[in-house]
Amino acid sequence: MNLDDVRDILALMRENGLSEFEIEKEGLRLRLRKDSATGATAVAPAIVVAGVPAVSLTPHAAAAPPPAPVESGAAEVELAVVKSPIVGTFYRSPEPGASSFVEIGTTVKKGQVLCIIEAMKLMNEIDSEFDGEIVNIYVESGHPVQYGERLFAIRTA
Amino acid sequence: MFKKILIANRGEVALRIIYACKELGIKTVAVYSEADEHSLHVKFADEDVCIGPARSADSYLNVEAVISAAEVTGADAIHPGYGFLSESAYLADACAACHIKFIGPDAEVIRLMADKARARRVMRKAGVPILPGSDGPIESEDKALKIAKDIGYPVIIKATAGGGGRGMRVVRNAGELPHAFKTAQREAEAAFGVADVYLEKYVEAPRHIEFQILGDQHGSVVHLGERECSIQRRHQKLLEESPSPALSDKMRRKMGAVVIDAAKAVKYSNAGTFEFLMDQGGHFYFMEANTRLQVEHPVTEMVTGIDIVKEQIRIAAGERLSFKQSDVTFTGHSIECRVNAEDPETFVPSPGIIHAFSVPGGPGVRVETFAHSECTVSPYYDSMIAKIIVHGRDRQEAIARMRRVLEMTVVDGIKTSIPMHLKILADKDFIAGKLSTHFMERFATRPASGRLAEAV
């Protein structure tokens, strides 16, 4: 998948009036969504590269799958989505009453703790794979999450 | 009684457990890997949780993910089905630690029966006939030679940590033994992590006969008769039936009593199966006990009218068995065919998309499947896509009925083992009930070699 492929896909979407397109192959997941709020004739796609964060996991936990490579040639890569590598309960702060690890707008660095997922009474810290800014938080604190569930969107550009 | 059961499995057995839960008014939680997102068991469960990627080790075999899923959904029990974690003492222990009921025997009993050599010793003490063999793992070649001489050739070398037919070697004379012993140890180490091997008498042309038991947590145990599973290829069962054409009522009563004593001796609770080899003279030899529900449980259900999965749930919930041995009756004959997604000649797996799927109804027909039109058979899991079970007034009717059902079954888009099943059902010896575990060799594409463990 390179920039030309992405341009071809965008052209196909325009020609056929598609507003959303998603493909997954060889460790790369690409989603192109036309922002209906713009209403402009030019499409402003948000290219989402699925990334999986490194997690400091307990010995028995499943290994997190390797992160999809962020292509340096794809200059339009803007958003990375952090997905849950385990099943558990999502918490935004280290303990009840404490402030959240991150908020929308927080700038994060690679390796920074974004949240905790509790599984089998163990607190697993989920670290960011990326430098960037939190632009979306998909789950409320205290809610259960399953494997692969979207947690955060980080603008990396 | 449980309010919510999490099913730690997939495919047709997950659906089977959902059937029982729905009928008992119990809510269900399905867990699934990313490959099974659109699978029927996910669609029909009340709740579902994705627990990992396609690879079994990261999903269906992932104890932490399964327990976590039970915690976030508030399930109060886990049914492990068969395969995957059904004989995992680790899952049973984790359930106990997290106050979730594991629907199966205690972790201790699972561990005991998983150690094949230890299980033999305990069964022998409980009065169960076992194959003459070494009492435990054999330390040296010299010991092996002495024991083999005492038992009498032919003998078979097996891995103590093994099962399912892997890591075994037949030895026909003392000359072959040293090499076979060393090779078996190496293979056992590679396949199971433990090099320990033990030795048993090798029975020629045996029949595989297994007894189903149910025990409650208050000490009552009953048997539900036997199943004959001699039709196997590389130790994978293809067709099973109940009752066995080779057993008389007297033999059934005698062996039924033996397995009940054995189950009580180890304080067995929930469902279990005791597997035996029976020689041509009608002598039984204990092979192993499976501490879980078995794939072929439907043939027993058809003949006895008892819902084994419901009984498993009731037993786990602490209820006493609602029937005695004298209440158990055996009516008619039942046969099951395991329909696999594979080439019927070469047995090479055939994953893909099923475009048309149709199984006929009619009297005495039961189908357990997760397949449907436009469903994907993925390559990540075993190739069984459906179990077709029939019941007839006698064996002759059951055979005619199974032929009829298979001839009218449509599975378009992938290859299946159905043509092979039809060949089996048309075979003279099969029809006459002349079976042994060597039966499938007549359909092998290469002449069968003398060594059991080598690929045919």
Image (tube, coloured by chain):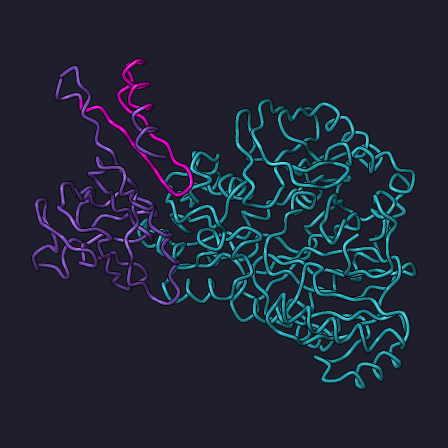
Chain colours: A purple, B cyan
- Report which quarter residue B400 is drawn in: top right
Rendering coords of residue B200 (x, y %): 80, 72
B374 left or right of B324 in image: left
Rendering coords of residue B93 (x, y %): 45, 67
Which residue: 54% across, 63% down? B105
Q: Nearer the viewer, residue A99 or A7?
A: A7
Can the viewer see residue B319 in this picture? no
A69 left or right of B202 in image: left
Q: Which residues are magenta?
A: A8-35
Which residue: 64% across, 71% down? B189
Q: How many marks?
A: 0
Can the viewer see residue B201 in this picture? yes
- Report which quarter residue A60 is drawn in: bottom left
- Report which quarter residue A49 is drawn in: top left
A107 left or right of B2 in image: left
Rendering coords of residue B89 (x, y %): 51, 66
Inspect the magenta stretch and tell me whether residue A23 lies in it.
yes
| Image height of B24 relative to B125, above or below | above
| Image height of B165 relative to A45, above or below | below
A45 left or right of B62 in image: left
Q: Nearer the viewer, residue B384 or B28?
A: B384
| Image height of B302 relative to B374, above or below | below
Inspect the magenta stretch and tell me whether residue B240 lies in it.
no
Q: Nearer the viewer, residue B158 or B368?
A: B158
Rendering coords of residue A78 (x, y %): 19, 38
Which residue: 32% across, 34% down? A30
Q: Nearer the viewer, residue B323 or A90?
A: A90
